[in-house]
Amino acid sequence: MIDFNLELKKFKPAVGVEVGEDNLFDDDIKDITDLVEEMVKKQNNKKSEK
């Protein structure tokens, strides 16, 4: 039978995982939500200028 407590004590995370997470979450590329929000703001500004 597996001793989960022993296995958890022996666990060591992979070295590359932390580096990969940093690259994923520090990404400055706009996603579709950012683009839609920008388009809506532009449309609202055009309407308010008229």
Image (cartoon, rainbow, N blue to C red):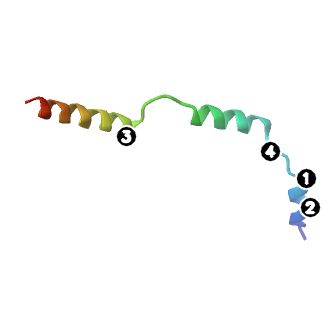
Q: Nearer the viewer, mark 3 or mark 1?
A: 3
Mark closer to the chain start, 2 or 3: 2
Q: Disc 4 marks which amino acid?
A: Pro
Q: Quote the CA–CA distance across marks 4 and 1.
A: 10 Å
- Which residue matches tag 2? 6
For image coordinates 79% across by 41% down, the residue present is 14
Mark linked to residue 10 = 1
Farthest residue, direction left:
50
Mark 4 neighbour class, 10 Å CA radius: few under 14, some 14 to 19, many 20 or more: few
Tell me the element at label 4. loop
Marks 1 and 2: CB-CB under 8 Å? yes
Mark 3 neighbour class, 10 Å CA radius: few under 14, some 14 to 19, many 20 or more: few
- Which residue matches tag 3? 33
Q: Quote the CA–CA distance across marks 2 and 3.
A: 44 Å
Mark 2 neighbour class, 10 Å CA radius: few under 14, some 14 to 19, many 20 or more: few
| Quarter holding residue 18 | top right
Q: Nearer the viewer, mark 2 or mark 3?
A: 3
- Out of 48 and 29, give the one closest to the viewer: 48
Q: Is residue 11 above or below residue 42?
A: below
- Which residue matches tag 4? 13
Residue 42 percent coordinates (x, y): 23, 31
Residue 41 percent coordinates (x, y): 25, 35
Tell me the element at label 2. helix
Q: Is residue 27 above or below residue 13?
A: above
Q: Quote the CA–CA distance across marks 3 and 1.
A: 41 Å
For image coordinates 62% across by 31% down, the residue present is 23
